[in-house]
């Protein structure tokens, strides 16, 4: 696999991954749950996370708190025509990142321009031996299988090593999205899901449909017990344990 050494720090030997996305600060500012990023990193590491996703500034601020063995994904914002990517990729490499993640807001009038910018970014990442994760985020139809398959495939074609995107809501429709992708897919969590069983069921169904894991943020660090929900997700993703066992763990059993 291209960029295999770095990807192996993101994706576990079983081919699956549990990523904690902590890159919300640029868009949301002082968001609840991320007041002390270093503390959250410690909790999700104890819970069994494979990797964390951080903006470059926060990565620089907390690099000394990142445990050995925890993968690091550098989030570089939204793909734009005005960004100078060579310097950003170089900065991520120098900070020790294992992967770069960029957001692609699809279904806009700038789709064609942004696709060409993604091609440029992927080429720069390849020159540095840096894996690229593209977050496919359709603006109008984020859960449509046809829409997701269309944009996931386009991002494959420009050189994405991993895709992060929405779960469609059903295993059958998500299998179609996975079948369109030459790259592994992780699902995003979106807003906080109050019913933990519902969250774990979504993860299980996505895995059964072909996803390799998750990149969750608020559903982990806004949970009352971030370490516990991380451990429960790990039980489902890496251990294949029944949902009732993961729910029991969440309830302190």
Image (cartoon, rainbow, N blue to C red):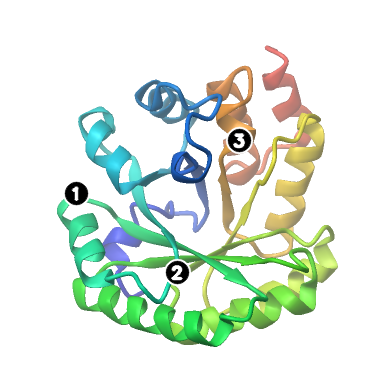
Q: Is residue 31 left or right of residue 143?
A: left
Q: Is residue 22 left or right of residue 54?
A: right
Q: Nearer the viewer, residue 12 or 154?
A: 154
- Looking at the rendered structure, the number of numbered marks drawn on it comes to 3
Q: Position of residue 95 (x, y in %)?
A: 19, 49
The dot on residue 218 is 3
Q: In terms of secondary structure, where does tag 2 sit?
A: loop
Task: Specify the quadrant that holds the C terminus.
Answer: top right
Label 2 environment density (alpha carbons within 10 Å; few <14, some 14–19, many ≥20): many
Q: Quadrant of residue 239?
A: top right
Q: Nearer the viewer, mark 1 or mark 2?
A: 2
Q: Is residue 65 left or right of residue 53?
A: left
Q: Position of residue 192 (x, y in %)?
A: 70, 35
Residue highlighted by disc 2: 79
Task: Specify the quadrant that holds the N terminus.
Answer: bottom left
Please give the name of the residue rendered at 64% of the width and 35% of the height, measured from the top-left corner.
219
* First in sequence: mark 1 vs mark 2: 2
Q: Determine whether label 1 and label 2 are within 8 Å by CB.
A: no
Q: Quadrant of residue 174?
A: bottom right
Cα–Cα gap, marks 3 and 2: 22 Å
Q: Position of residue 96 (x, y in %)?
A: 20, 50
Cα–Cα gap, marks 1 and 3: 25 Å
* First in sequence: mark 1 vs mark 3: 1
Please give the name of the residue rendered at 58% of the width and 53% of the height, measured from the top-left corner.
213
Cα–Cα gap, marks 1 and 2: 21 Å
Residue highlighted by disc 1: 95
Q: Position of residue 30 (x, y in %)?
A: 48, 29
The dot on residue 9 is none
Q: Nearer the viewer, residue 82 or 128?
A: 82
Please give the name of the residue rendered at 21% of the width and 78% of the height, measured from the top-left corner.
127
* First in sequence: mark 3 vs mark 2: 2
């Amino acid at each position: 696999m291209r960029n295999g050494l770095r990807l192996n720090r993101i994706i576990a030997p079983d081919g699956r991954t549990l990523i904690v996305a902590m890159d919300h600060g640029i868009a949301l500012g002082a968001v609840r749950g991320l007041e002390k990023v270093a503390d959250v990193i410690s909790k999700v590491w104890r819970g069994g996370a494979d990797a964390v996703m951080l903006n470059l500034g926060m990565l620089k601020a907390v690099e000394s708190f990142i445990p050995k063995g925890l993968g690091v994904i550098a989030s570089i914002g939204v793909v734009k025509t005005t960004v100078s990517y060579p310097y950003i990729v170089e900065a991520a490499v120098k900070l020790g990142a294992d992967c770069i993640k960029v957001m692609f807001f699809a279904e806009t009038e700038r789709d064609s321009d942004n696709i060409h910018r993604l091609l440029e970014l992927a080429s720069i990442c390849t020159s540095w031996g840096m894996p690229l994760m593209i977050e496919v985020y359709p603006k109008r139809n984020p859960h449509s299988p046809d829409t997701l398959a269309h944009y996931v495939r386009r991002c494959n074609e420009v050189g994405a090593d991993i895709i992060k995107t929405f779960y469609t809501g059903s295993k059958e429709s998500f299998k179609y999205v996975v079948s369109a992708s030459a790259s592994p897919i992780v699902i995003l969590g979106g807003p906080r899901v109050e019913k933990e069983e519902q969250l774990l069921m979504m993860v299980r169904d996505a895995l059964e449909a072909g996803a390799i894991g998750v990149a969750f943020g608020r559903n982990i660090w806004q949970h009352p017990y971030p370490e516990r929900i991380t451990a429960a997700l790990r039980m489902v993703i890496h251990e294949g344990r029944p949902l009732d066992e993961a729910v029991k763990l969440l309830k302190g059993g």
